[in-house]
């Protein structure tokens, strides 16, 4: 009896430590997302360079997410997570002591590589620790923790700017990584060591053969294009177009993070109850695209804050649904590879947005750039919906009545 009670308590404690670690990691990233663009702008970077600083970090994360997923399957997450946290700290401190933009790009790439490892390790650990029937709630709590970090990071960094300069702020916020230590230790208790070598080809083939994979990947690209573009340009957009002081730009980012985080757990509970997840992705992406178009035409603080508060829950629900579908696509021996692929597509989409639409922002302004990005995202998510609807019709025409149990959860519920 005592053992049966102690084990759930230990599992709950482990999940709490993982959620706190995720919050601390993303608090550091979010603080960096506020201070690095502003610092780069101060030392002479133009709008495109500011967006490119964001993109090179996310591209680096995309490159390493899939290989790190293989390593997670082979060795487990503890060592990879610990090494990545050290790399993050070193790269952030190095940026604080950098005085030229080209060198900032180098350290952003190194920090992005560390983020790719963290993404695969944390998502794999959480996915492995819960049953499939509770994946939506687990992803909701995990992404809530991440969004709590996105709130705390800019809040702390923005508040600190009242007393210290940007370079000192970048260095000081590195201390947030201290809160990842219990989670890094807790990850060591998960059982993801497969002993099957560094296999990549077969897990990828098995993943690509699943009908839900291509549509959900297109949906993920659609959502990350808009999210990445807003994430890259919102700090400078707040200063130049909205004409806000640095502290209020930080508050705007923090407000967005609060709404984002508070939307995650209810979205997860809803998704666990829905027979299909793709409508959540569709309406979430469309809702956020509309908010992005409106945002580009506003000034001041109140109106953009209202638009972000209304539009962000749509994107939050879409990301939770996509995360659950990718978790459904994984198996015990390929969990790291599947979540690594999720991280690769996620970071690739986040980086492509600023790179593709940065020249539009530079040449034609924020409103034109945001509108173009939203239009492309809407077109992609419409393609996803068409593919998913076509697959559903074909399965319905082929399968006898009541045959839903012969299909995998990812096929049934994507």
Image (cartoon, helix red, strand yellow):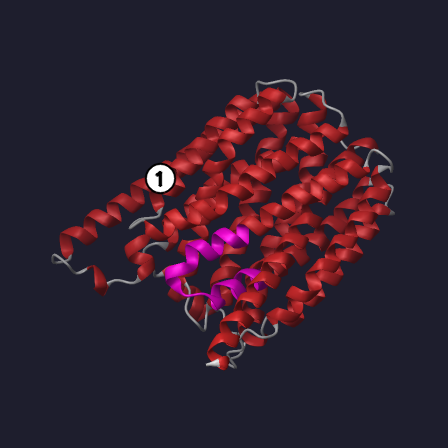
Task: Name which residue lies at 40% across and 54% down.
Answer: 325
Q: Picture coordinates of residue 81 (x, y %)?
A: 65, 65
- Residue 100 placement, left or right of 320: right
Q: Mark 1 points at which residue?
A: 383
Q: Residues within 10 Å of mark 1 (few under 14, many from 20)?
A: some
Instruction: Using the rendered image of the protein, determine whether residue 355 is visible from the camera's viewpoint.
Output: no
Q: In the rendered image of this protein, does residue 124 appear above or below residue 274?
A: below
Task: Name which residue lies at 49% across and 69% down.
Answer: 200
Instruction: Using the rendered image of the protein, determine whether residue 218 is visible from the camera's viewpoint.
Output: yes
Q: Picture coordinates of residue 356 (x, y %)?
A: 57, 35
Task: Name which residue lies at 59% across and 39% down.
Answer: 258
Residue 125: say if magenta: yes
Q: Picture coordinates of residue 174 (x, y %)?
A: 78, 52
Name, please, the residue furthest toward the left: 400
Q: In the rendered image of this protein, does residue 185 appear above or below residue 312?
A: below
Q: What stretch is highlighted in magenta?
A: 120-143
Majority secondary structure in the magenta region = helix
Which quadrant of the view contains residue 1? Answer: bottom left
Q: What element carries label 1?
A: helix
């Amino acid at each position: 009896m005592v053992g049966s009670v102690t084990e759930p308590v230990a599992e709950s404690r482990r999940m709490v430590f993982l959620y706190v670690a995720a919050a601390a990691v993303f608090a550091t990233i979010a603080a960096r997302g506020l201070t690095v663009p502003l610092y780069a702008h101060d030392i002479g970077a133009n709008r495109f360079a500011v967006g490119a600083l964001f993109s090179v970090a996310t591209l680096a994360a995309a490159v390493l997410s899939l290989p790190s997923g293989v390593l997670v399957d082979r060795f487990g997450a503890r060592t990879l997570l610990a090494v990545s946290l050290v790399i993050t700290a070193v790269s952030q401190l190095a940026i604080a002591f950098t005085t030229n933009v080209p060198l900032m790009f180098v350290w952003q790439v190194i920090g992005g590589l560390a983020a790719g490892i963290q993404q695969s390790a944390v998502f794999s650990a959480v996915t492995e620790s819960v049953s499939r029937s509770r994946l939506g709630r687990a992803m909701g709590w995990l992404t809530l923790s991440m969004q709590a970090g996105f709130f705390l990071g800019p809040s702390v960094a923005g508040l600190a700017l009242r007393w210290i300069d940007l370079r000192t702020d970048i260095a000081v916020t590195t201390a947030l990584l201290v809160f990842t230590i219990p989670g890094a230790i807790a990850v060591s208790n998960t059982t993801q060591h497969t002993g099957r070598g560094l296999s990549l080809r077969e897990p990828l083939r098995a993943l690509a053969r699943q009908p839900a994979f291509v549509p959900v990947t297109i949906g993920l690209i659609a959502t990350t294009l808009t999210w990445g573009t807003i994430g890259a340009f919102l700090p400078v957009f707040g200063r130049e177009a909205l004409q806000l002081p640095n502290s209020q730009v930080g508050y705007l980012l923090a407000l967005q993070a609060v709404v984002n985080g508070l939307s995650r757990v209810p979205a997860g509970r809803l998704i666990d109850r829905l027979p299909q997840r793709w409508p959540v992705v569709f309406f979430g992406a469309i809702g956020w695209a509309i908010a992005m178009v409106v945002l580009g035409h506003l000034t001041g603080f109140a109106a953009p804050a209202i638009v972000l508060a209304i539009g962000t829950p749509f994107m939050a629900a879409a990301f939770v649904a996509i995360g659950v579908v990718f978790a459904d696509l994984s198996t015990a021996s390929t969990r790291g590879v599947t979540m690594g692929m999720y991280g690769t597509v996620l970071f690739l989409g986040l980086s492509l947005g600023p790179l593709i639409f940065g020249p539009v922002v530079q040449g034609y302004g924020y409103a034109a750039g945001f509108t173009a990005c939203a239009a492309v995202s809407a077109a992609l998510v419409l393609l996803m919906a068409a593919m998913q609807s076509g697959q559903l019709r074909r399965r319905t025409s082929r399968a006898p009545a009541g045959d839903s149990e012969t299909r995998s959860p990812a096929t049934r519920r994507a």
